[in-house]
Structure formats: C-alpha cells, structure tokens
Amino acid sequence: MSSFPSTPPENGNSHDRVVLETSPSDTRKYRHVTLSSNHLPVLLISDPTTDKSSATLSAQVGHLSDPPKIPGLAHFLEHMLFMGSTKYPGENDYNSYLSSHGGSSNAYTATEQTVYYFDVLSPHLGGALDRFARFFIDPLMRADAVGREVLAVDSENAKNVQNDSWRMYQLTKGLARDEHPFRKFGTGNASTLRDGDLTGHKAEKGLATSDAGEEMPEGEGEKVDESRVRILREALLEFHGNFYSANTMQVCLLGRESLDELEAMAVEHFGGVANKNLVPPAFPGTPYETDQTAKILHVVPIKDVRYVELVFPIEETNSYYRAKPTQYIAHLLGHESAGSVLAHLKQKGWANDLSAGGSNNCSDFSTFSVTVELTDAGLEYVEEVVEVIFAYINMMKETGPQEWILRESQTVSDNNFQFLSKRQPIDYTQTIASCMHLYPVLHILSGPYKVFDYEPGLITSIVEKLLPQNCMIFVVAKTFEGKTKKKEKWYGTDYDIADFSPEQMKKWTEASVLSDGMKELHYPARNDLICTDFNLRESVSNTRSVSKQDVPSLLMDTPCCRVFFKLDDTFKMPKLNVMMSMRSEVAYESPKSSNLTLIFVEVLKEHCMDFSYHASMASLHSVAYNAKSGIEMTITGYNHKLHVLLSKIVDEFKNFQSKVKENLFERIKDKTSKQFKNFYFKQPYQHAVYGADICMEEKKWTIQEKIDALPDLTIDDLKEFSERFLSKFHIEMLIHGNASKEEAKQIAATLLEGLNPEAPSELPVTQVVKLKQGNEYAYRFREFNEENTNSSIEILYQIGRTNIAETGMLVVVNYLINEPAFNELRTQESLGYIVHTSVKTNGNDIKSLLILIQSDSFDPDHCDKRVEEFLLRMRTTILEMNSEEFQANIGAVVEQYREKNKNLSEESSKYWQEIGRSSYNFRKHLLIAEEVEKITQPEALAFYDRYIAKSGKDRRKFSARVYGKNHVSSMDTILSDVTLIESLGDFKRDVGFYQTQEPFDFESMK
C-alpha cells in the first residue's frame, strides 16, 4: 500500500490522504491525486515489473447527451479525436507511434461516458501520453477526416444492423418515454451525421479553423457535401467544448516509473486539459413509467432464437456497491442447481438456459433482467414460464433475505479479491478509469469485487419492485415473422406490443411455489466447494540449490496418457489449471460423429450442472467443448477442491450411458440444430474465415453437412458413440499451478483409473492444402444472410511449414503492414469498418499471412485490388524505411514475444497451445524473439518479395470472397489469372497436401 507525505507536495497537486484498499496479493503501488491546475482526478499505478504501460481517460459524457437532431454525435466525436491535434497534426500520428512501439488503442461510447485507452512498451509511455492527451486539449477534426469518418461510423453501424443484440438494445431504448434521452440512437450512421437535420449549427464563412486558429487543410478525400462537413465539424467542436472538461474526467495511469515520476508525467501531459467547471450531465427520472410497463412484446429476430426476457425498471444501484443487492438477487434467480428456476424449467422441457442480473446501469436509473432461452415447447408455454419466475420472486419476498446466502457470496468475493490475479495493463486501466467516479477513493480497487455489508432492507426494497405491473416482457422468436405490425426506427426490427391482460396480471401476481407443480422450487443448498485451504506448495528449488523450473516437464508418458506438469513458483497463488485433451479418431470421422461429439459434450454438461454451478460460484470453473481431435476440457480455480470437482465429472462420464434420457437428448439435439442454422446469420467476415477453412483443410465438414446429418440421430446412436469414444482414447494433460508432483499424478490417475481407456492405434491428424507456387485461387459464395448488406474477403498468402527463423520473419512482415493496412484501407480509403491482418495457422503448423476486410460499400473483388495496391506500396515503404524506424519495429516485436505473463492462466494458455499443436516447444516465444532480433531490413524485404509480392517466386495466394446484398451482381465478374474453386473435392485433389509433421521425440524430454 502506498503512503503519502504529510506536507503539501511541491507541485501543488492534492493527494488523497486515504490509502486505497488493495489486494494482499498486489505488489504495485497506488496514489490518487487531483491535479492542481485543472482538478483532474488521476489514479497512478507504479509497477516496476511491467513490460507495457497504459493510460485510460474516461469522460463523463455519452450518447445520452447527443443533440436531439444529431444522433451519434458523441460516438462520432470519439472517432474524430484519434485523427490529429494541433501539436501532432498527422491524422495517423497517434496510432502510428503506438504501433511502432508495441502498443494498441481503442475507445467506446456508452450512455453516460466515453472511454479512451492505450498501451505501449514502457520506455515509450511519455511519447504516447503526449499524443493521447492532445485529444482533450487541441483536437483538429479536419474537414477531410470528418467527411471520411462519417463513412466509417456508417460502416460500423451497418455491421450491427443484422445483429440481434444491437436490435434488441435499441428496441428496449425505444420504449422509453418520449422525453427521456435513453430513447436515443447512440451509434449514428450516414443519415444522422451526413444527411440529418443540422439546423442550429452554422459553419463560419471561409475556411474552418482549428482550435489553435490555424487554417484547416481541405484534403482530397471529402465524401460528404462540403458545407455539411463544416457544419458537422462545428457541431463536434461545440460538443467537445460543452462536455469535455478536466473536472468531469478520470484518468488511470500505469507505468514502471515511481509514483512521483508518474505524477510528474500526469501534470506535464494532462495539466493542459481545460477545466470548465462543468457538472456531469444528469438525466433524472426513470425512462419507464406506468405507461411504459406491464407490456408484452413479440419480436422477430434475425437468428433462429427463442427466448423470453423480463425487464424491470429500478432505481440506480451503483451507490449500493457496499451491499450489492442486485448481485444477491441475480445469484438466486440465476442459479442452475436443484430447486432453481432453470432446473424446474428444464425438467418441464421448456428451457435450455437462464441468466439474470442488473443492466442499463445509469446515474439515475437501472434495470434488472431475467432472460430464459426457450425450447420449442417453452415457446408454447411462455405464460407458464413467466409464472415460474414470479413464483420464485414471490418466495423471496415471503421468506425475506437469507443472510447465510449473502455470507457465502461475501466469502467468495473476499477470497477472489485477496488472490486477485494481474491483468493486462490496458484492461486494468480501462476497468479502473471507467468506474473511478462510482467509488470513494478507498474502494476504487475493492469496490467492484467485495461485498462489504449485509443490508436486508436494500435487498427487500429491490425485490419488492420485481412486480408484473413494473415489468416489460419481450418474447423473441422467428415464429412471429409476418405476424407483427410495428417496425423499430433504426434497425427495422419487426414487433408487436400489447398490455398485459387482466388474466396474465392475476396469474403472475399470485404465482406461488406452493402451487401444484412448483413445490420443488427452493433456495440452493449450501456450497461445499468453497475453498478454505490457501497454503502454497513449495518447490524443490526453494529448499535445495536447484535451478527453477521455467517450463513444464514431462511427468507421465504411457500409450494412453501424456502429462506435463509445472509447479507455479512465479505468481504464488493457491490456484491450479488443469487442461486435458481426450483425442480419438472417432470424434470427427464423419459429419454424424462430429455432431455426436458435440451432443455428447452438451449432455455431459447438463449432467454436471447441479454441482458445476456450485463450483463456479466458488470460483472453480470447468469448461468442456468438442474439437476435431476429440473432447477438450479445462478445470481452473482454487486448487483446494479441484480434485473433488474432477472426480464428480469423471463419475458423470462413467455413468453417461445409464443416465442420459430421451427428453434431454432431444432438447440438446434441437439446440444443436438451432446453433448450426444460426451460423448462417453471423457476420460476413466470420463466413469468410469459415470459407477459407473448409478449403484449406483436408477434412473439414461444412455446416450444411452437419445439418443434414442431424435429424436421423437417435439416443441409441449417442449411447453407442459414447461407449466407443470412452473405450479407446489418448489423453494429453497440462497440470500447472499450486500442486505437487504427487498431487498432479493423482489428478491424472483420477481420470485414467476412473475411465480406464485403451490406447488407440492412431491419433487424428489434420492435413493442410498445399497451394501451387505462383498460383492464385478464389472461393466465391453468396452471403448466407441475404439481408446483410456487408461483403467480406479473407486473403491468405501461404508461407507453409516454417522454422523458428521463418516464423519470426513472417511475424515481422505482419507487424510492419498491420497499422498501415488499417490506416490506408480502413481510414483513408474507407473500404470498411473491419480491416485486420494477422498470422494464420492451419492445422498444427502451416503458416500464412492473413488480410481480412468486411465492407458494405465495396465488393470483395474491389477490396482485393486495393489490398494488392497497398502491398505494392508497402514494399516501397519497407525499402525506404530508415534504419531507426525499422529497428523500432523489430524492437517492438521482440518485446512483444518477451513480454512476461501477467497471470497463471496466460502462462498456461501458451503452454497448452504448444501441446495442442504437437510442437511441445514451450520456449517458442523466447526463441522467436531471438530470431527476430537478428532480422535485417534486406532480409525482411527478401522474404516479402519471395512470398507476398505479386511477382514472388514462392507466392501462393488464396481468397474466400463473400458477396453481401449490396454486391451480389459482382459475383459473376471475371477474375483474370485466378483459379476459381467450383468443387472443394476437385480443388483439394488438384493441389494436394503438406506432409504431416514428424512425430515428436519425447525421449529428449524425459
């Protein structure tokens, strides 16, 4: 914990005398100051061990403050602040600086705040802060940038138009009373920004000027009427002037410098932010009064989803952080064990899932929601489903708050705060800054986690508001298509709305757990999985003169099992990560078996639900999922009772065939069918990734093949499959954390002795297509969702199987093009909101350079041409890059690969990735860093010329092109020098595959 001087500091800043409550596991130092020059609150975090530094600024203004006639202005301003300042007029200076120094940035606009954040390699914090702070001191908002960025916002909105979450959020907002700003459309689009009513905002005659009074460059990229651009720019400057003030902002700054040094940096860079002595915008009163509640809406979704959501308007709850009453209520309504609402609805065959919790938390109001994912049968019994929820709520009212339940939650929250793991700096500063205004200084860090007080009166007061007359019910299903009469303004969501009938009101008001059929509803049992033993295991290196184990060792290697183990002596937390892969060829041998693997896992999770939910409430988490190679499972959390959870899961595996029931099988089968069909309504860029994967891998079942194989599956198929799978599989495990070797062996034995599998004769292998040198291939298809206006393209420049040095070279090339691609293709050319580059791995080890674009303005063929033009320019950029700039990029990549793990899970994930790819090279990141350090500029250019440049002798190019509603006519455009893929089978037979990787020699690890 930090301490403060007893005399006023020389810089005159106000130091809070209160020492922040920090986690006992946290070794960082903290200081909360208020800058004397402008009353800006700043939380300083000194972490001498950090590789990256970070800063976040939260401005207490969001889209609720948008001018009524310019929806989306706050969000648009968020975009524009990135695009140059008087001191740094280059439109891309900020992002370019961060990129060349291992950094990243982002921002978001919420209802009542706008949050900006970045990270950067620690030695470069000062330069990043200087550029960042100018957002809030002297932003330029150039006319040419305004015109182009309108298109970026419009593209962002177009991405969301076919997204059910955005559609439902706006529909909920649109139900608010007319005079409340919660109704507003916060994203904005071209119509609201470019074509909207700008009456009342007038541009000055002649050239617009920056805040510094300099002439504003016109630029050549204006895509919006010039006079409207000027008016819009004036509106942006006015909004910035009216709402952005130092006294209504919060900054969180994390670096490796001392607290005094960080404070000096805060003064230097943020001291110039103007203090206008503003009062944060306030929006008193609830958006939903009696005229808006007691309503039921029937809504048509985009995806084939079925759910009912109950939304209750309540008072703001942020000020109740000490008692967290909505957390208590959500815990009980959202419980999944015996006696819960969900368990009852599942037993009836009406529901698959349920969630509950606070939502729309604003300064003057919030809402509490209960959402139930329905089965087809549940959709027929919506009134009864709602009745069950109100019966449980009424039980809570009648019995009153249960102190023992809150004390359990309090114990777990105390444990979690005591053993709080570090996070990435950019995530940490963002979380802190965005809620600094919610907590007193003492509890800025602990407030979000801990339950301090038991306040039964607060709990009761909120439960009393969970009434039918204070509720809006949304019933969402495709079955309402063509039967509704209303259309939401911004997203076009079809819906109907009606008052609750007197019969519904009576049924839900009088709902009781004493009624026939609901007597099994009750509070959850006491949680016996809460950890009470936090002792740390001692490593051999702590007791003898033995070197520290820095990577996992091979603990067991048998025909059935391979176990890697590493005792954690870095983070020293009472936590353990157990990761396992049960590998079998039967898991993916056909679309039918792929489906059965998925259903097997989903049914197993249902069987485990009664105890796994208790475990999750005790911060002991289990996750299982199907993979091409078999079944993957992880168990993470406090090590004390992890073995108990594993034993329970193993028992469910053993008893699977005798326990699985027809009704559960059919419910999961139906859920799986909906899941497959809803894939067709995902984003076009996700479809492009899918299109590439089914082309590039030898055995990759299409979604349609899986859908076709599903209807004929029976419960007997599942029983036979589970028996076949469990009788013969190979397991690989990673046991990493607070466990001794003996305990790790016992964990492995629990699984092996419990299931007793035979060793399989062969293990699954993924073969990857080997594109022909000098050839280009394209796989074209119509966007599955015919109403989606967006198109997408994924381009792969296949490198092949690479060694460490070649991997390093590819990583560098990707790093060099990443930020320029975003700047040129997304910002300058306005191709689309999504522009992304990365290194792609197909199978275990076949590498490619990936470029991904999603656009509602341009077809995939145009995007491909622009990418090729960009790559041509990038060659010149790399060639002409000065040595200092090139070395800065090399240094950033090196530091990225040498970056220390922030927590146990981050470290485990890196090891598990190497196990999953059968490379077992646990030092790969460090080895890549060593190779990158050696790369020269001519070598990088030679690699680029060989694999990426259009004339490259080893260039192999593939693209998956998805044509959305706006660009269907372009599908038939003739592509010169491109081989179109008409048949996946013919394509794969023609090009062939890479040889499978050589088996790893485990003798070297023993």
Image (cartoon, rainbow, N blue to C red):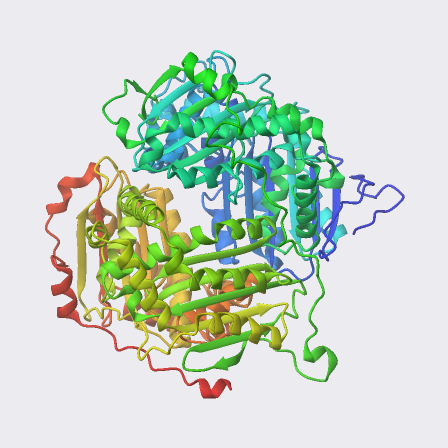
Instruction: Report the residue at 30% width, 34% height from top.
Output: 302
Left or right of 883 in this view: 17:
right
Q: Which residue is drawn at 24% across and 72% down?
A: 954
Residue 274 in view (yes/no):
no
- In the current view of this chain or complex, which residue is farthest to the bottom? 1003
Question: Residue 848, image x and y in percent?
Answer: 32, 65
- In this orientation, which residue lies closer to the viewer: 935 or 383? 383
Placement of 333 over or under 649, stated as above or below: above
Residue 636 drawn at (x, y percent) = 55, 60
Judging depth in this view, the residue of 109 and 334 nearest the camera is 334
Q: Where is 474 relative to 759, above or below? A: above
Horizontal side of residue 827 vs 243, given as left or right: left
Taking the image as shown, residue 313 lies to the left or right of residue 488, namely right
Q: Which of 542 and 740 is in front in this view?
A: 740
Question: What residue is shown at x 35% (from left), y 45% (from top)?
Answer: 834
x and y percent of residue 399 in the render? 64, 29
541 relative to 806 in the view: left or right: right
Q: Give the x, y percent position of residue 381.
A: 36, 29
**Closer-to-camera residue (401/797):** 401
Q: Is residue 828 visible?
A: yes
